[in-house]
Amino acid sequence: MGMQLAHRATSLPPSEVPSKSKIVWEKFSHQSKFQQKLYHYGTFPQGFSWGVSSSAYQIEGGWNADGKGPSVWDTFAQKPGSIPGNANGDVACDSYHRFEEDLYMLRALRVKSYRFSLSWSRIFPDGLRTSLNYKGVEYYNRVIDGLAANNITPMVTLYHWDLPQALQNLGGWENTDMIDIFNDFCDFCFATFGDRVKFWMTFNQPYTIAWSGYGLGQVPPNIKNPGIAPYRVAHNLIKAHAKVYHTYDDKYRKSQGGLVSITLSADWVEPKDVNVLREVVAADRALQFKLGWFAHPIFKNGDYPDAMKWQVGNKSELQDLRETRLPLFTEEEKSFIKGTADVFCVNHYTTKIVSHVTARLSPPSYEHDWDFSESEEGDSPTTAISNQRAVAWGLRRLLNWIKEEYGNPDIYITENGVATDMKTTFDDINRVFYYKTYVNEALKAHNLDGVNVKGYIAASLMDSFEWVSGYTVGFGLHHVDFTYPNRPRTPKRSAHYYYHVMKDNGFPLPNDEKILYGEFPNFFNWSTASSSYQVRNINTFTLLRNSWHICGKPTWCSVRCFLMAPTTSSMKPD
């Protein structure tokens, strides 16, 4: 019990966890629907980073071309019955052979940045440096050089879920050896591409890796161990990220001058009843369990949030376990992890409604440790993915929460977008509305709330292999026709719209909405008017003369007492 008790000793019960971030619910949750939807005109500052995103397995294809090794996603998707329609990423958008077409789209959009990922098994087919594949390195050199030639900043994700299968055979992210193995891969990438790449992200959505991959088993490596594996995997991912950050810091930062971060994911959560403290605490706990799981160690103090330590420790004790299921960091590890990100990168798609519950104890599960339930925000439009409604106002609140919780860091929105049915090809008006409202909420956060939003990355450049949904839905600004071998790309209405948003750097006030200051020309005829019927034959001049005799000047009140005008002027004379 010693380990478990030690983990809880510095933690407060969930109902007493202090959180400066509760300011966000106090500030925003009492807004009316009208206030939520008010449109804000304005622009982002010069230098704001506009871009689009993709990931290697989703677009590259060429799954075994030129010496590439298989990844866990190759293994999973190629197994019949894994994906709707037995879809896979063997060819996908065929970007491995058609990057010039991708570059053409990027140039046409005039984006400032392009976020993409490196396929680990294309560079190291079995995951280790000894298997180096020069053809894979050549491909990414072409990509990076093509972007640089067109003044497009590459934003590179080092790991976007596609672990080399050979490393999964060694235990994957449950194996602590992966910390050093991943660091060696990243070290090679820094040395090889870092002269041109100045923005690095270690992991994309480690939450998805830990929970969906090792807890629910929904995505590779499809392991269902919800009570222990997610915590163990997250522990290794955090330590791996920190090691990579220090490798860059120690060996490359001085000569290359780049940024290193990690891309976290977060829905916004609203309490079911903002006037009930327990519900607000449950909403805060939801953010701590999902975003804070990784952000708290990296951006605060090198350790997990108190809410997590209390919940998991308490549940573990009630389950008669000898120690908490949430692993411990040593003091040395906390110091090593704290501060290992130069900017805050966040992926965001939707908002959920959260309510406090008392979850069951058996079987042990990360999900049961939460003690809250989630539901959809029912007043917002649905999308092609269930439980992912378009709730634009949640983005502003999430950005404010990050500001309050993590000391107002520079924030890059590294993914934001909406899925539509693949039958919707070019006239994607719903996506246009999504971007208009979500980007506007990011603008409000920056201009009205003082959040340091530095960039916005639309997801995604084009329709692609959409993970477990295959090719049934698409997030793309460009339509890709997967029925043709040459995978033709065509811009959608949303691509044209996003182009103009980027060109305008936001939403400048239209001319017909601007307040106009100026003067009329000389000899402009100023006058007043009346009608005989309205004044009912009363001699206005006489009234004014009489009021002058009463109080020394023709007062407004004395005239109003006698004039029978149908409306009251808002003017207030002296």
Image: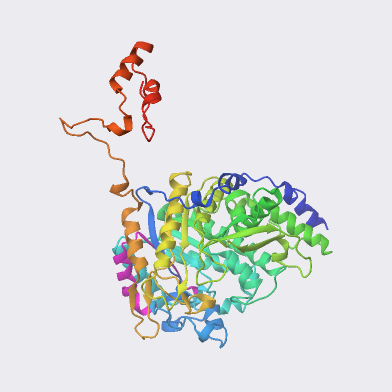
Task: Say whether residue 412 is magenta.
Answer: no
Which residue occupies the foreground of this view, 127 or 446? Answer: 446
Q: Residue at x 46, y 65 (%)?
A: 417
> Residue 51 placed where, x, y %?
39, 61
Give residue 282's position: percent from left, percent from top. 68, 54
Q: Nearer the viewer, residue 329 or 256?
A: 329
For the N terminus, the quadrant is: bottom right
Magenta residues: mostly which secondary structure? helix
Lateral position of residue 179 relative to residue 445, left or right: right
Residue located farthest toward the front when viewing the structure as drawn: 537
Of residue 506 and residue 528, the one placed in the foreground of this image is 528
**Left or right: 335 in relation to 248:** right
The way the protein has been coloured in the rendering is: rainbow
Q: Residue at x 31, y 50 (%)?
A: 510
In this figure, what is the number of numbered marks? 0
Image quadrant occupied by the C terminus = top left
Give me the residue at 62% from left, 59% from top: 353
Q: Is residue 522 visible?
A: yes
x and y percent of residue 506 in the render?
A: 36, 53
Q: Residue 284's spot in the image, x, y percent? A: 64, 52
Among all residues in the image, which is located at the extreme left? 523
Q: Is residue 326 visible?
A: no
Q: Residue 370 lies in what quarter of the image?
A: bottom right
Q: Quadrant of residue 182?
A: bottom right
Q: Is residue 114 left or right of residue 29?
A: left
Q: Is residue 117 magenta?
A: yes
The stretch of residues the image draws in magenta is 96-120
